[in-house]
Amino acid sequence: MLGRQPSTRRLTDNECHDLLNCLPQELISRAALCRDEGHGTTVSYSRKVFIPLTQLCRDVCHYCTFAKPPSGLADAYLSPEQVLDIARAGAAMNCKEALFTLGDKPELRYPAARDALNNLGYDTTIEYLCAVAGLVYRETGLLPHLNPGVMTEAEIASLREVSVSMGIMLESTSGKLLKRGGCHFGSPDKNPQVRLATINSAGELGVPFTSGILIGIGETRADRIESLLALRKLHEQHGHLQEIIVQNFKAKPGTLMANATEPDLAELQWSIAVARLIFGAQMSIQAPPNLSAGHTVALVEAGINDWGGVSPLTPDHVNPEAPWPHLDDLSADTAKAGKVLVERLGIYPEYCRSASLHQWLAPTLHKSVLDFTDADGLARTDPWCPGTVDIDLPVQPVAPFYRKNSEIDNIIDRAFVGKDLSQAEVERLFAARGDEVVQITRAADQLRTQVSGETVSYVVTRNINYTNICYFKCRFCAFSKGKTSENLRGKPYNLNLEEIVGRARQAWDRGAVEVCLQGGIHPEYTGQTYLDILQSIKHALPEIHVHAFSPLEIHQGAETLGIPVREFLQRLIDAGLGSLPGTAAEILDDEVRSVICPDKINTAQWFDVINTAHQLNLKTTATIMFGHVDQPANWSRHLLALRDQQQRTGGFTELVPLPFVHMEAPLYRKGGCRRGPTWRECLLMHAVSRLVLHPHIPNIQTSWVKLGASGIKACLDAGANDVGGTLMNETITRAAGAGHGQEMTPQNLERILAESGRPSRQRTTLYKNAPEVQQRVSYRAPVLIPVSRAASAGPD
């Protein structure tokens, strides 16, 4: 049966039962293919701390050593202080998940539990759990995952406010396990219908949920398939099961099942493979690594893509005889299976991406979850973010020997010979992890050497942001202000023509060959305002290159004059405009623009301005601002749209990746986006851009304002060949919270590049060598006095 069907096709219930008749190796091979289709080369885990809130339980499962009677415990419940001590220790070890595991409603069985809860000020275990989970989240930032057993709909709703996910193992739908002699005899909460009702309620309430089966407790293989189908039915109704655990029974001394036979590795592999085939490529299938020590490779081969929670601090209180593997060892074992170990949160990626948060998480949890995640929804593993000055760059593994991925090699080979990469291929490059990142960055660096050589270029320029008053409401922007009367996030300003020309003249006298002019969209500005600014500068300084006005300003300027974009651009060109900055692009995908800048020009309008400029032989740059609500699919569409435009018109001089600086951005402060890209994402953006845009856009720039000296050095080894401008006055990124300053002198830039063994050259806007006279002036320019907004404020 399997040999004739695609590995990713949904199996019918009858076909799932027919898996009983398949050869084990056939199942395992097909399951591995199916897993790879959905999860590629990664296997995930969650870095957790285990908090056993209470080991009292009203059930008496015959295999369990976690549950204990009151006489076996010093205290019925951990106190809030004890819980916080464990959580704080976990946070100090970079754990992100607080796993609360506890017995099922012990107050229904033990007076001691009721008395302890009364002393703590609560009526039920669930109420106490809700309180301490919220306490842990508020005090430590750890994200609670809760396993309290059977719950009512009201209880799930209350716990949803303080947790990112919950779970309950179905274990088995086999009714015989509840009968005398069965492992669940005397355990009312193990009734499969009761447990399925809890799982169903979680789905109805939109709770990311964990469940699974426990194998080897007296059920048959057919029972396992029935159990998995019951879970699949609920998941297809609600979409809330984020993982299916396949856990193997371990016999424990002192239990009624101490002498029971444990399932062997072949049985576990069979069960994993069947779970994978029943749930398909996208589901996360998990097997705990500590319960199969020495066999991790075999579990990966059977179709898992997740190891579950692994704690560097606390033991597995449910299976204390089986210690967690050291994460370095788990990473090495995962690599032996041809996979890369990646960290996730207690909530899986598909549930914690920006677009999914409102469906799956309480609003109070959004900001913390986004703070912890990268663009794939996996865990950020270091505190670095763009614009920071007091945190070292994360160490990227650059080993002399590393495992090459043949799929990535094939994509790289196509890029080197100028073949157009598909969106799927670009997304695959952005998905790189571990050694794959090294593979891509080295290839991009090699291609950069072929195209641009070793010399790094930069331009002596001045940024003149003539106003920060703007009537657009871009949610990522910390630069723009409202009217003076509103006084939003600092003092609004509007430079007059005399001040603008004075700054341009000062720039020329300090060796600049270019001034870059952009600003907010002032409600009183028209297209004539931009013409006046341009004419004033060119009248005073006819030799300086004016690189000015974003596509948004061009669109707005033409609109206010009631003329077509083409006519307005031609007027600007006639007045001396030298080139156009390709800003206001952000992410050229309206799916993202509708969130971050809904009232701004859309993707088609941006390209209309750019295309018209190119047709008029006006060169432009291109930009991409990444690391907020965007994902690799959006980046891929953006880069491919730029490539296609360049193939038509050839007017882009460079691509400038702009890592999002989050600190003061309104969208971030309201909990609506991530805190910029990770360092891995920054490296990949520069490297992938080099590969995707070759040979059409030869220059890839890296931003010292956003990445600092160490950041640009690294990006120059990952495909970049240009470090942008000296700037003199940088205000937009600093307004967002970056701390790398507002000017980088030629001497400092060249010193940084020399430290990397790279020669440098001053260039013009259009990548010619800068005039020698201006170069000499730039090296002896006096220190620039930082601009004071108060001093430069003009009339509103």
Image: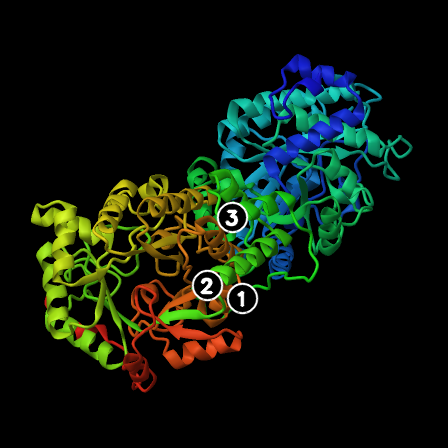
| Amino acid bearing label 3 | Val
For label 3, the residue is: 417
Give the colour scheme shown. rainbow
The picture quadrant where one finds residue 23 is top right
Report the amino acid beneath label 2: Ser
Residue 600 circle label? none
Along the line of sight, the residue nearer the viewer: 283 or 765: 765
Q: Which residue carries the number 1 mark?
A: 393
Image quarter of the N terminus: top right
The residue located at (58%, 37%) in the rendering is: 166
Residue 682 or 644: which is nearer the viewer?
Answer: 644
Q: Is residue 382 left or right of residue 701?
A: right
Label 3 or label 1, whichever lies nearer to me, is 3
Residue at which label 2 appears: 452
- Which quadrant is the C terminus positioned in? bottom left
- Secondary element at image label 2: helix
What whole-number distance in Å separates the C-alpha atoms at marks 1 and 2?
26 Å
The answer to which of marks 1 and 2 sits earlier in the sequence is: 1
C-alpha separation, residue under disc 3 versus residue under disc 1: 33 Å
Percent x, y for residue 303? Answer: 70, 34
